[in-house]
Image (cartoon, grey):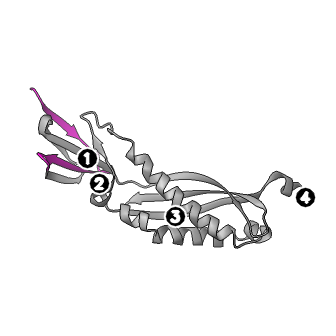
Amino acid sequence: MLGINYIKFDSMNYVIHYQNGKVKQEGRGLSFFYFSPNSSIVSIPVQSNDFQFVFKETTKDYQEVTLQGQITYKIQSPKQIAETLDFTVNNKKQYLKNDYEKIQQRIINEAQTASASIIQRLNLKEALRQLEDIEKEIFSNIQKSKTVQMLGLEVLSVNILGVTPNPEMARA
């Protein structure tokens, strides 16, 4: 039939079905028929996600270090993030825009700001030895971030995998 489609989502997607600009139904793992000319479907993945980061920072004693780590997060408030970013899908469940990638970039920006402020307070020896303290402070700063709160995200963990000096300093 013309324009009538069926779509089904798994339980790890929060779905909002808009019809004529108004919410017709919403929830996790929905499946339904819809009339495509006047419908818009938003699918927000609510599972946890991990991503890696690598930052170059300068310590208090002007030594360059590389900070490697991983951040785990999930979308805690799907409605809130749907107000800020576009998660609209077509009838094949493909996103019309790449706004999902913006989430990671915004968290990375917050993590880099936090790591810079921490590393700049430490000398090289302290930066190499205080991984746990650096990790805790980055985690705390990201959780308090207005950006993370505005998007309705929950940062589950921050793991610092290593702080390494530049190659010339490592040989010394």
Q: Are marks 2 and 3 in contact (CB under 8 Å)?
A: no
| Residue that mark 1 sits on | 42
Determine the secondary structure under disc 3: strand
Label placed on residue 157: 3
Choose the circle earlier in sequence order: 3 or 1. 1
Q: Between 68 and 149, which is closer to the camera in this rendering? A: 149
Kind of residue sitting beneath label 4: Ala
* CA neighbours of label 2 inside 10 A, class few (<14), some (14 to 19), many (20+): some
Compared across the picture, whether 76 is left or right of 8 comes to right
Q: Are marks 1 and 2 in contact (CB under 8 Å)?
A: yes
Determine the secondary structure under disc 2: helix
Determine the secondary structure under disc 1: strand
Q: Between 7 and 127, which is closer to the camera in this rendering? A: 127
| Residue that mark 4 sits on | 172
Kind of residue sitting beneath label 3: Ser
**Which residue is outermost to the front?**
62
Choose the circle earlier in sequence order: 2 or 3. 2
- Residue drawn 59% across the image and 53% down it: 53
Kind of residue sitting beneath label 2: Ala
79 within the magenta span: no
- Residue drawn 31% across the image and 50% down it: 44
* Res 41 → quadrant: top left
| Residue that mark 2 sits on | 82
* CA neighbours of label 4 inside 10 A, class few (<14), some (14 to 19), many (20+): few
Choose the circle earlier in sequence order: 4 or 2. 2
Q: Are marks 4 and 2 in contact (CB under 8 Å)?
A: no
In the image, residue 63 sits, relative to residue 118, either above or below, namely above
- Residue drawn 17% across the image and 36% down it: 6
Choose the circle earlier in sequence order: 1 or 2. 1
Span highlighted in magenta in the image: 1-21
**Cα gap from disc 1 to disc 4, whole angstroms:** 55 Å
